[in-house]
Image: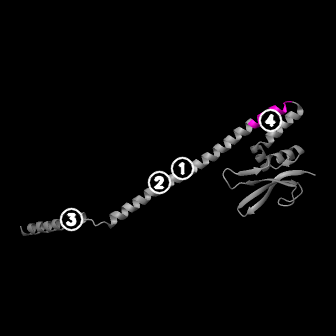
Amino acid sequence: MAVKIRLARRGRKKAAQFDIVVADARAPRDGRFIEKIGTYDPNTNPATINFDGEKAFDWIMKGAQPTDTVRAMLSYRGVLYRKHLQLGVIKGAISQDVADERFTSWKEQKDTKIEGKRTSLGSAKDEARKSALAAETKVKEARAEAIRKKNTPVAEPVAAVAEGETTEAAASADTTEEAGA
């Protein structure tokens, strides 16, 4: 019997979530499975991958074949690297202590990298929110200033109208003088 580690879809339309399952290769995608080993949510950034690494490692060592997507997840979480190290131990190339030490140091580096990405995304999101708020405040203040100018009584245009009347009267007087001369 060929065993696969694959994704089984669940969740509503356009908001898929997946279970990471171990199933017979002949079983339908969302059908019967042998064991559920975790979940995968691609809707978050970075994608949320939760699975039992020990169970996944055991199934990989027993010969279960992961699909391409699950293989990428197992590689991302270090299960395939652990398998690589364990095969080296079985062949006698390295000792179990050395393999465990290498895996632990790799895992610490990977966790640091993942946490760094998560915090940088969070800080970028906060900065974008602050800049949008600042731009919105600037627009709001400009609108308030325009409304204030519109609603305040303006004394200058009244004076300009009075000056305009005197210049019109002077201009008409000039034309009458020219006509009379």
Mark 3 secondary-structure assignment: helix
Nearest to viewer (mark 1 / mark 4): 4
Lower sequence index among marks 2 and 3: 2
- The residues bearing labels 3 and 4 have C-alpha atoms spaced at a distance of 90 Å
Compared across the picture, whether 118 is left or right of 107 comes to left
Q: Which residue is mark 4?
A: 100
Q: Which residue is mark 1?
A: 127
- The residues bearing labels 2 and 3 have C-alpha atoms spaced at a distance of 39 Å
Against 153, residue 115 (above or below) is above
Lower sequence index among marks 1 and 4: 4
Q: Which residue is mark 3?
A: 159
Residue 101 part of the magenta segment: yes
What amino acid is labelled 4 in the image? Asp
Mark 1 secondary-structure assignment: helix
Nearest to viewer (mark 3 / mark 4): 4
Against 151, residue 4 (above or below) is above
Q: Which residue is mark 2?
A: 134
Residue 114 part of the magenta segment: no
Q: Image quarter for residue 76?
A: top right
What amino acid is labelled 1 in the image? Glu
Lower sequence index among marks 3 and 4: 4
Query: Dot 3, crowdedness within 10 Å: few (<14), some or many (≥20)?
Result: few
Residues shaded magenta: 93-104
